[in-house]
Image (cartoon, rainbow, N blue to C red):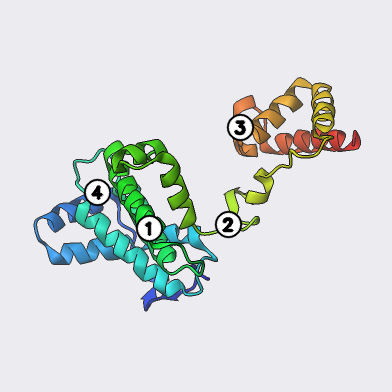
Amino acid sequence: MQFNKVEISGVDTNSLKVLTEEEKLELLERTRNGDKKAREELINGNLRLVLSVLQRFTGRSDCADDLFQVGVVGLIKAIDNFDPKFAVKFSSYAHPMIAGEVRRYLRDFQPVRVSRSLRDLAYKSMLAKEKLTEKLRREPTPTEIAIETGEQRSDIVTAMESVSEPLSLYDPVYSDSGDTLYVLDQIKDSCDDKTWLDELSVKETIAALKPREKQILYLRFFKGATQMEVAKTIGISQAQVSRLEKGALDRIKEQF
């Protein structure tokens, strides 16, 4: 599925306008006063936001045009429900609304059949999640959703997981300057009887590194910082961070 192609659903993505926050607020106010032209301009001015949200669903559907149209529906709902008094940018408010609309579409048309009762509970949970997100200005926890719906937390978790799209081990979790982290990178096997020995060896090897090398590895692999962020934190260049990181990793590999 390609979201970077020139035309989707008859829309030339290269010619899409990008609105400033001031323009958005002005159009939102006019829209609330019944200005249909302003509403249409607001929709067209946020289509790039829809495209950016759809990037998260690459590979989930064979038809980018369908998902784009569904995303636009989510955008329209966000426009109709947004209040300029909210202490949040419109794009921050609209993003989860668009993503939620796409998830509902994918859930209803997924190839794996889920029982009607489970689907109904999942839909109820998603509505509660959207309501709480708007109220709390953050994503609610499963416990908060359970309290809102009056259902058991375990049932909420099961229902929402049952309608979630399966992930590929090679789906990107985070990407920065080509330094991509995949789902596969976050999976470990703790069933091996020798695991604790390997962990002990790694700890001993890391302990033998120089202080700056240990700091770089800590920031990079435990805190998830990019090389540029590490360079800024410890006051050296990104090239030096890259060299020190590579040298430390090479010495660790030599021990094994």
Check disc 4 and give the amino acid type: Glu
Judging depth in this view, the residue of 203 and 48 nearest the camera is 203
Splitting the image into 4 quarters, where does residue 222 fall?
top right
Q: Give the Cα separation between the discs numbered 2 and 1.
A: 24 Å
Q: CA–CA distance between discs 4 and 1? A: 45 Å
Q: Which residue is at 67% across, 35% downward?
A: 221
Q: Position of residue 234 (x, y in %)?
A: 64, 25
Q: Of circles 2 and 1, which is in front?
A: 1
Q: Picture quarter containing residue 167?
A: bottom right
Say whether marks 4 and 1 touch (CB < 8 Å). Answer: no
Residue 159 at x, y percent in the picture: 43, 52
Q: Which mark is residue 117?
A: 1
Residue at (65% x, 55% y) in the render: 169
The image shows residue 52 at horizontal and vertical percentages of 44, 58
| Nearest the eye: 94 or 121 | 121
Query: Which residue is denoted by mark 2 in the rendering?
Result: 167
Q: Which residue is mark 3?
A: 223
Whether residue 179 is visible here, answered yes or no, is no
Q: Which is nearer the N-term, disc 3 or disc 4?
A: 4
Mark 4 vs mark 1: which is more N-terminal? 4
- Mark 3 or 1, closer to the camera: 1
Compared to 52, does 140 lie above or below?
above
Amino acid type, callout 3: Lys
Q: Earlier in the sequence, mark 3 or mark 2?
A: 2
Q: Secondary structure at mark 3?
A: loop
Specify the amino acid type for callout 2: Leu
Point out the tag, 2 or 4, that comes first from the N-terminus: 4
Q: Nearer the viewer, mark 3 or mark 4?
A: 3
Residue mark closest to the camera, 4 vs 1: 1
Looking at the image, is mark 2 or mark 1 earlier in the sequence? 1
Pointer 4: what residue? 22
